[in-house]
């Protein structure tokens, strides 16, 4: 696949400190940014689009980990607080 460059603005002093401390851990900023970009790609681009791009480029499909989102919980209806059911007539009796 053809590579392209991404340019961002970042505070110079922070960047210097970041590179310094990453080097102490034998890490390269560019490698970590590439991993982060791959993560963003896997998270935001639908899997069928990723598969299509990989098929077009001739690269073997490397499935990115799926991001699981929790299902919304079902809402339970609270009891009727405006009145009580009149059982004999089937209508509402207001208090």
Image (tube, rainbow, N blue to C red):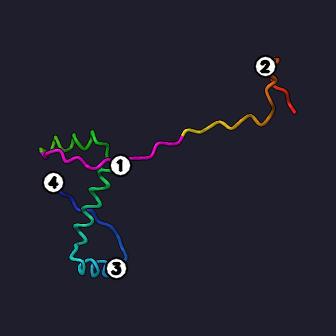
Q: Give the mark nearer the N terminus: 2 vs 1.
A: 1
What residue does disc 1 label?
67
Instruction: Report if residue 8 lies within the magenta region.
Output: no
Q: Residue 46 at x, y = what percent?
A: 31, 43
Secondary structure state at the residue bearing disc 2: loop
In the picture, the quarter occupied by the C terminus is top right
**Marks 2 and 1: which is nearer the front?**
2
| Identity of the residue drawn at 78% across and 19% down | 90
What residue does disc 4 label?
2
| Identity of the residue drawn at 32% across and 67% down | 8
Secondary structure state at the residue bearing disc 4: loop
Instruction: Specify whether 75 is left or right of 6.
Output: right
Looking at the image, is 78 positioned above or below residue 43? Answer: above
State if disc 1 and disc 4 touch (CB < 8 Å).
no
User: Crowdedness of circle 4 by 10 Å Cα count: few (<14), some, many (20+)?
Assistant: few
Q: Give the mark nearer the N terminus: 2 vs 3.
A: 3
Region of the chain picked out in magenta, as a range = 59-73
Nearer to the camera, 20 or 25:
25
Q: Give the mark nearer the N terminus: 1 vs 3.
A: 3
Q: Residue 26 at x, y = what percent?
A: 21, 76
Residue 41 badge: none
Q: Give the mark nearer the N terminus: 4 vs 1.
A: 4
Q: Give the mark nearer the N terminus: 4 vs 3.
A: 4
What residue does disc 2 label?
90
Residue 12 badge: 3
């Amino acid at each position: 696949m053809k590579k392209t460059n991404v340019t961002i603005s970042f505070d110079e002093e922070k960047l210097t400190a970041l590179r310094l401390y990453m080097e102490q851990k034998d890490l390269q900023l560019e490698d970590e940014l590439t991993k982060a970009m791959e993560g963003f790609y896997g998270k935001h681009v639908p899997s069928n689009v990723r598969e299509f791009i990989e098929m077009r480029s001739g690269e073997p499909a490397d499935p990115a980990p799926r991001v699981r989102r929790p299902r919304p919980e079902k809402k339970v209806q609270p009891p009727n607080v405006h009145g009580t059911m009149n059982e004999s007539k089937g209508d509402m009796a207001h208090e």
